[in-house]
Each structure stands twice: as structure tokens, then as C-alpha cells.
Amino acid sequence: MKTMIPNQLINLQTNLKFEKSSEPMRIKVLLLLLLVTICTSVSAQRNLDSDETLVVKEIDSYLNSQGAMRRTSETANSGVKNLEDLILNNQSSVYLNSGSVTTYGEKPKNLYTDLNSLNQITNAQFIKDYVEIVIVSVKNSAELSRTFDTSLLSSLKKLKYVYLVFDVNVTESNVARMIRNNNDKYSFFYKITNKS
């Protein structure tokens, strides 16, 4: 006759798990669960910290450094040239402020708006197929505590650049803290127009 030796962790002879398991085995299982919980929370914290590594560049410094590199190298960076054209030259543009939409030109590449109007972009009636840059104005220091959710820009399929223009003093870290749901396909730039 064959005798059955029960598993220490699960006793198949009973319906209750852990009924006849040893005390050291229970302690080992609990310690293993504790270790998994700690590792998971450390990993989650590391992921949260990595979101803060958003790179936000001051536009004038960026264009000056890239311009110097373009002059010294034979091949011009078309992305920098495109950004420069979008910011410095007249383009077909859309202005979205307080629900009011004004369009200049047939295929607007620039979208000018403010923090209060960001949530209206998806439902606003304008041609979104050609917009490559969103220029957001931040008028006062109270708006620095607000967040900029980049998921609100998902309807702009060709969007490459987000350019924040501040009328108050700000640092790169202040700007990075404002931005939520960062999408790696966007490049972020800022400028301070009132350096008081």
C-alpha cells in the first residue's frame, strides 16, 4: 500500500490550507510577502521620481547654442530650423482664449492660448491637422501653481513643441513641476518676457 506524504505548505488531505503547516513555514511566507510589498513600493517611488526628469529648455539659450552648432557643422539641424521658423517668423495661426477662436491663414501651424483655455482645445472648432507648436501664456504668479496636462493636446496630431511664455520669473524646475502626463514626442521650451 502506498502512503501519501503531505506537502508542508498545502495539505491535500484537508480542505483548509496551512492547517497543518509548520510555524517556520508561515513566517517564511509572511516575510516573502513583506519583501515583495517593499520592493513594489520602492519601484513605484522610483517611477514617480523619473517623471520629474522632464527636460524644459529656455528658448533663447537653446536657439543660440543650436545656432552656434549649426554654423560650425556642415549639416543644418532641420528640427532647430523648423522651431526657429515657427517662433520667429509669421505663420498661419490660431488664437484660443476664453472659448473664443480666431484663425489667421488656411493651415495654422501655431496655436496661441493660455492656461485657462487648455481644456477647450479638444472641442474648439479650428483646423488641428497642421498645428506644430502650442504657445501658452502664463500671465501671473498665481498661475504657477496650476498644472499643464499634456493629454489635453492629444487632438493635435502634428504637435512637436510646447512653448510656455511667462510674464513672471520662473525656473526650469518650476516649469517642469507644472507639466503633467508628459508625452515624449513633445519638446518643452519656455521664455520669461518680464524679467523684473
Image (cartoon, rainbow, N blue to C red):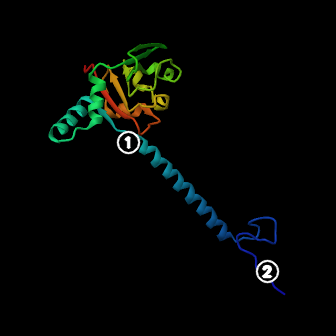
Residue 21 in which image quadrant:
bottom right
Name the image quarter holding the C terminus.
Answer: top left
Taking the spot 29% from the left edge, 30% from the top edge, the residue there is 82
Name the image quarter holding the N terminus.
Answer: bottom right
Q: Is residue 36 left or right of residue 127?
A: right
Is 10 or 124 nearer to us in this picture? 124
User: What x and y, as percent, mark residue 108?
Assistant: 39, 21
Residue type at tag 1: Thr
Is 153 or 116 nearer to us in this picture? 153
Location of mark 2 (residue): 4
Location of mark 1 (residue): 53
Residue type at tag 2: Met
Taking the spot 53% from the left edge, 55% from the top edge, the residue there is 38
Outermost residue to the bottom: 1
Kindly check if marks 1 and 2 are in contact, taking CB atoms under 8 A apart as contact: no
Q: Is residue 133 left or right of residue 62?
A: right
